[in-house]
Amino acid sequence: MRENIYLDYQATTPTDPEVVKAIIPYLTEKFANPSSTNKFGVEANKVVEVGRDIIAKSLNCFSNEIIFTSGATESINAVLKGLFEFEMLGHIVTVKSEHSAVLNTCRYLERKGATVTYLDVEENGFINLQQFNTCGGDASE
C-alpha cells in the first residue's frame, strides 16, 4: 500500500507535540474567553499575552505589533484593507494565480479606488519581468 503524501502545508501543518502538551489544559479545563473580565478570562488573557511576548521576542519586535487572527483570509483583509484605508497603499501588484482571498480583496479595493495590476504567470510559475516593469515594479529589487 502506498503512503499518502500531504502537500498542503501552506493551509495547515501538524502541531508540534510540545505545543499540544502546553495547550491541552486550555482546551479541556482552563478554557475561557481571554477578552472577558471574569477570573477565567483574565487567566486566559495572561496566557495569550505570554505567547504574544514569546513570539515578539523571537521576531525581534514589540508585543503590541503581534496581532492574532483566525486565519489567512482575515489577515489578508486586515493588512490590505488597513493599508488602503490609511492611504499607505495605492497601487497593488499581484498575480492572477494568487489565492482567492487576495484576489477578492483586491477586487473589493478596486471598487474603492485602488489601482490593482494582475500579472500573468508563465507555465514555469514565474512572472514575466517585462510585464512587472511596465506596471511600475523594479525587477532589481
Image (cartoon, rainbow, N blue to C red):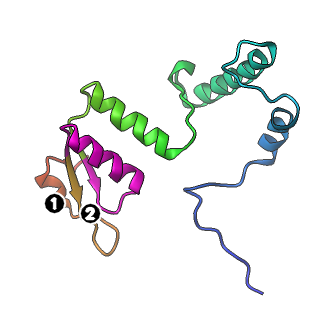
95 left or right of 133 in image:
right
Instruction: Verify whether residue 113 appears in magenta.
Output: yes
Tell me the crowding category of disc 1: few under 14, some 14 to 19, or many 20 or more residues within 10 angstroms, Cα based: some
Q: Which residue is mark 2?
A: 127
**Which residues make up the magenta segment?**
93-115
Residue 111, label in figure: none
Q: Residue at x 80, y 13 (%)?
A: 39
Secondary structure beneath label 2: loop
Q: Residue at x 80, y 30 (%)?
A: 31
Q: Residue at x 81, y 47 (%)?
A: 17
Q: Residue at x 34, y 35 (%)?
A: 81
Q: Which residue is mark 1?
A: 131
Tell me the crowding category of disc 2: few under 14, some 14 to 19, or many 20 or more residues within 10 angstroms, Cα based: some
Displayed quadrant of residue 87: top left
Q: How many marks?
A: 2
29 up-or-down from 127: above or below: above
61 left or right of 133 in image:
right
Q: Position of residue 8 (x, y in %)?
A: 58, 63
Displayed quadrant of residue 60: top right
Outermost residue toward the left in this view = 134
117 up-or-down from 129: above or below: above
Outermost residue toward the bottom in this view = 1
Instruction: Verify whether residue 88 appears in magenta.
Output: no
Q: Quadrant of the N terminus?
A: bottom right
Residue 93 vs residue 39, the one in the foreground: 39
15 left or right of 81 in image:
right
Q: Position of residue 36 (x, y in %)?
A: 70, 17
The answer to whether marks 2 and 1 mark residues whose Cβ atoms lie closer than 8 Å is yes
Residue type at mark 1 is Gln
